Image (cartoon, coloured by chain):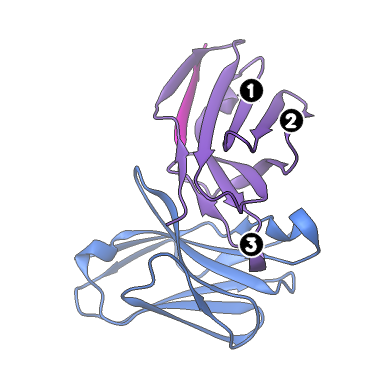
Chain colours: A purple, B blue
Amino acid sequence: QKEVEQNSGPLSVPEGAIASLNCTYSDRGSQSFFWYRQYSGKSPELIMFIYSNGDKEDGRFTAQLNKASQYVSLLIRDSQPSDSATYLCAAGGTSYGKLTFGQGTILTVHP
Amino acid sequence: DVKVTQSSRYLVKRTGEKVFLECVQDMDHENMFWYRQDPGLGLRLIYFSYDVKMKEKGDIPEGYSVSREKKERFSLILESASTNQTSMYLCASSTPEGGILGEKLFFGSGTQLSVL
């Protein structure tokens, strides 16, 4: 069974701080990794993807991938209350776009 | 913008009923997926389809079936609904544009199904 595990939440950070979300995966065949954000009562939306070892930055978001350790992370700098949501990590790279999701981490950014 | 439409936002059914959840996408995507989302368990894949009339089991297909007669429409069927199928059901679509872009999922707004 391919698994994706996320650090248990909920995670609470003050406004302006760095939020760190972590994820590990069991299938070494996974090639691509995704972070989805899901606001309460809404559907998930893609915010970052990464497929090469190292860091990938997009605005306040940085995704990090370490394939040797089978570890993915998402850093949110200068966290805002609007970042409060559930963050879902997903692993892919197989045929037909099939993704395996983690259980999600609830992030709360308090003013 | 890609639009994935699920026919119902909330649905209440009784045990033993046959339930149909409908999903339509308007971007000519080849791939369509049905996930269920439960607290603490994340999204779990029920079935997916990569072409008309093609279907593949996901991780938790038991108790479900699917139908894809047209490219834009993917239906999830609960043959005999049970209380443990109470959940949020999310439909998604994607297109194999090549490489990582083919794995970007576009989700519908979800159907919260309650089986009493």
**Label of residue A54 in the image:** 2
Q: Nearer the viewer, mark 2 or mark 1?
A: 2
- Residue B53's spot in the image, x, y percent? 59, 88
Q: Could you tell which of marks 3 and 1 lies nearer the N-terminus?
A: 1
* Residue at horizontal 44 percent and vertical 30 percent from the top: A7
Q: Could you tell which of marks 3 and 2 lies nearer the N-terminus?
A: 2
Q: Are marks 3 and 1 in contact (CB under 8 Å)?
A: no
Q: Chain of mark 3?
A: A
Amino acid type for the residue under numbered disc 1: Ile
> Could you give the CA–CA distance between mark 3 and mark 1, rounded to whole angstroms?
28 Å
Residue at the extreme right of the image, as rendered: B98
Q: Chain of mark 2?
A: A
B26 lies above or below A34: below
Q: Quadrant of residue B20?
A: bottom left
Amino acid type for the residue under numbered disc 2: Gly
**Label of residue A76 in the image:** 1
